[in-house]
Amino acid sequence: GARGPDSVARGQRSMSGHHYSPVDDDELPGSFRHRQRTLQRWRVSMLGAFLSGVVVTMLVYPRVLPCRACAPCGTTANIGAVVDDAVKRAVAQCPTCPSCPECPHLNSKECPPAPACPSCALTCPELQGASGPSDDEVVARHRERMLSRPMVNILECKPGQVCRADSLNRSRVIGQKGITLWMTGLSGSGKTTIAEALEKRLLYALGKNVFRIDGDNLRTGLTRDLGFSPDDRTESVRRASQVAALFSEAGIITMVTLISPYRKDRDAAREMHAVQGIPFMEVFMDVPLSVVQARDPKGLYKKVAEGKIKNFTGIDAPYEAPLAAELVIKNSDMSIDACVDVLVAALTQKGVLTGHEMSDGLAPPDGGTLINLIVPADQMAAKRAEAETLPKVPLTDVDVNWLQVIGEGWAAPLRGFMREGTLVQTLHFNSILLDPNAIDGDYNSRQTDWMQDSFPKERVNMPVPIVLPITDFTRREIKQASAVALTNAAGVPIAILRAPEVYELRVRELIHRTFGVTDDSHPYIKMLLAPGKDYAVGGEVELLGKITYNDGLDQYRLTVEELRAAFRKKGADVVYAFQTRNPTHAGHAFLMKDSRQKLMERGYKKPVLWLSPLGGWTKKSDVPLDVRVKQHHEVMAAGELHPDWTVMAIWPSPMIYAGPTEVQFHAKSRRVGGASFFTVGRDPAGMPYSSGPHEGDDLYHPDHGRYALMASPGVGQMQFLGFEKVYYDKKDHTMRGKDPSRKDDFISISGSKMRKLAALGAKPCPPQIPSDLIASKCIPPGFMVDKGWQIVSDYYIRQQTGDWVPYSKQLGGLPLAPAMRTSAEAPFGKAAFTAHFADSTGAVISPWHQIPLHPAGAAADEVSFVCEIPRGATAKLEVNKKVPHNPIMQDIKKGELRYYTYGASFFNYGMLPQTWEDPAAKSGFNGTVGDNDPLDVMELGSRTCKVGEVRTVKILGDLELIDQGELDHKILVIDTSDPLASQLSSALDLKRVMPGVLPKLVEWLKLYKTTDGKAANALASDTPTSAAKAMEVVADCHASWKALKARGAGDTGFWLG
């Protein structure tokens, strides 16, 4: 119909001016008056039939009289009298047995005696008078009897029989859940209007299957036989609810728009849905009578006022308003779009708009199932024991970050590092196949089959490759193993990877398809291009406990399940996420609060903000993680982002700086965490070129990331809250959007300007804000909370000298011997880490100078071995010759901690105390000199030593490594307590007792530096020297140490005690 002349702009239409759908006219079939007239015509036809019967009776009656003896009287019966009498008796009452006609002659003697008439008993049904029940009452009573009768022999499903598809699977397939929205309210309250608008939004904008049931489409068929009596209204509601339940059970969002004035009828509809387990939501259009009378879209209220309509709901017939409706919409104060927003928000909160499980306003993860791969506590001991027996795959810091992402479910439905087929899908489609109904588990958990010809039809978003690169050495170590242990830098197994699939890693293809740029100095690309890791291993993982980092920030690291529980605890009916790699200033806070206000305007009651600082690896120039987290904490403590509606939780992913591709993964993980909305700004996940002719230019257009994210086919039901640039308002000292009417009151404070001011230690500006903040060395009041600014300023002042946590990097956890002493302020993983030796009295000693080379009572071929690097550890730990007491520390080069990257070591590595390879003695192979260190030792026993552990070992031989003109002896030994020690007297016995170990040792020593981009090492011989020859080397180096001690450190810088 046409719109009213006072309608406002589209999207902000007023309910008062909207056209409503027509109802039944008085003359239409099915109306009350039409039914009355039909009944009258029926009664007239019945009367005609009755009179016809009377006429027939009149004609036939004389011939069927039981007494014919009077006929000879010679007189003809008075036909008129007989007719009059028959009519009289037919109309007045049913006739009794007729008597014989009397003889008309006056002289009765002339009449013959009349024979006796036969007896009879004629009866007629009594006619009901005006006081009997009406037709409607008779029908209602009959309906009540029929509805209350037992359902004998009617059974939809036999016990234990599955007659219909499982509702959850049905929902997943069609991508939504069925629900009945029961919209009730007075005529003219907007039920149909708002339902029509909601139908369009759901169908056209959100792609959902929806249907409306209202009075009109019911009265043309299903309720055509019903009127408007209370009983008929009840029956109308019952029928509508039954139909709605069937639609909803089929997964259709079903709207019922009936006045349904009686509370008991609506409650009965609700109860029927509850019994069948079908979602039901009562929506009350709470509009005052005066408003609906003014609207009067059908002209009904006017007819009521003129007396043309009686018993009208809300006027002279009751309307019982809901007492506990799920949703109350006072649409007289709202636009139609605002009403629809409220309904969509309610449907979202109930999880109706997704086919997967969703509760308490939290979005479901991609694939619909939360992933938690942390081994249960009751299985932990057995799994850890198993891990010790498996081949080891060492992880870098970035690998650990990705492992946490996978194991805690942030990359759902991924359950492990990508197999090759999954990687190919990711690179080419930014998505992966999903088959949740597969009998043998998740599709991506299968070994890649390049010849398969049947694939699942469902896909989920997966824009970035999550792979585990390995070296050829590690590939060969895995062999045909059914599982491998994933170890951290300390050599500790932190996960098991099942059914490993090893494949060639085509790094250049991965880079080009993920990043779409050529920039080999890009920090993440540079890591991918590191030499030696030409393969990858994929497979499903089991975490051997929650991954922790021991950096003081673990309290902010919540798993997916813990985070969602935190949202539920705050009563969230929707979650929106905001990610930042920078400190939060007032502009950010303004955007986050503005986003919350927008959500409340959409009808959400308790939007909760997820402030999610990225916690994984980041490039050096980014603000460290601990600085960001501590600054965010102060912003919350100051109430700028109130703790009642804010949850700060670290998102564990590393940053790969892949622009539009990566930001899709950021959004995906936020959905996993429960967020339905994501606030995203310009140039998300971008950075400048690091090399080449475009160095310094943006890798990606600043607007492309947000656009690609919002247009991505994999975002599901997630919505995005964009924002424009904000400025500092000098007038009221806040951050906000610029007011064009007073442009001079606003100044821009860029990130670079903020960093300069922080490095200058800028203090708050005076009330009159200067135009040049840098020159004035001041920060405008209100730009950032005071304590937060102090944290940021302190970082930029001490950027090069401070001890920061740049990103999530595991600290501590290194297996230490009981005698070792470390500092909590300098745990393993930090550059300042030191592990001192202590004697039985607790006094600190030097392992180099104070532990004897030959243990008391030991055999001639037995010496003391000090373990520096346990089997499987990758950190390059060594006794520091120059620090007092010679503690064990991690080697550092160019400011970076050093690690072995070739593969997991299969030996314990350490040194022999009281030895020194003199660089002045040219007694080595081809005139090589000593390497200026204590003798290096490779212990080959089956037991994994701890850092600083001192063991008595048997000397087996020596492999002489040539390194840049220096001779670096590698003394081969075995723990005297090892089960195989008695079978080994020299290195030559290794071929027999420990087959394969010696070739691996030779390969390791030659190639372990190649994965750092260095040339291969050389050995004097691939065959170890004899045990006797090795003992001579030990004796010579012991003598060199004695000489060093005797003459003093000199210019060596050594600490000699």
Image (cartoon, grey):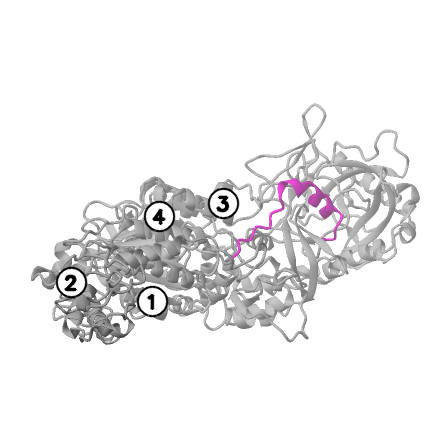
Magenta region includes residue 632: no
Q: Is residue 783 left or right of residue 209?
A: left
Q: Amino acid at mark 4?
A: Leu
Query: Residue 169, relative to residue 929: is it above or below?
Result: below
Q: To which residue does mark 2 refer?
A: 16
* Mark 4 and mark 2: Cα distance apart in space: 60 Å
Mark earlier in primary sequence (4, 1): 1
* Residue at image point 49% right, 65% down: 658
The picture quadrant where one finds residue 187 is bottom left
Query: Residue 960, relative to residue 556: is it above or below?
Result: below
Magenta segment, which residues? Answer: 368-392
Mark 3 neighbour class, 10 Å CA radius: few under 14, some 14 to 19, many 20 or more: few
Specify the quadrant that holds the C terminus.
Answer: top right
304 vs 968, nearest the viewer: 304
Q: To which residue does mark 1 refer?
A: 222
Where residue 760 is drawn, which disc sits there? 4
Q: Secondary structure at mark 2?
A: helix
Q: Amino acid at mark 1?
A: Leu
Q: Nearer the viewer, mark 2 or mark 3?
A: 2
Instruction: Residue 659: give x, y in percent of width and height.
Output: 45, 65
* Mark 1 and mark 3: Cα distance apart in space: 50 Å
644 vs 974, nearest the viewer: 644
Q: To which residue does mark 3 refer?
A: 562
Q: Nearer the viewer, mark 1 or mark 2?
A: 1
431 vs 531, nearest the viewer: 431
* Mark 3 and mark 4: Cα distance apart in space: 40 Å
Mark 1 neighbour class, 10 Å CA radius: few under 14, some 14 to 19, many 20 or more: few
Magenta region includes residue 384: yes
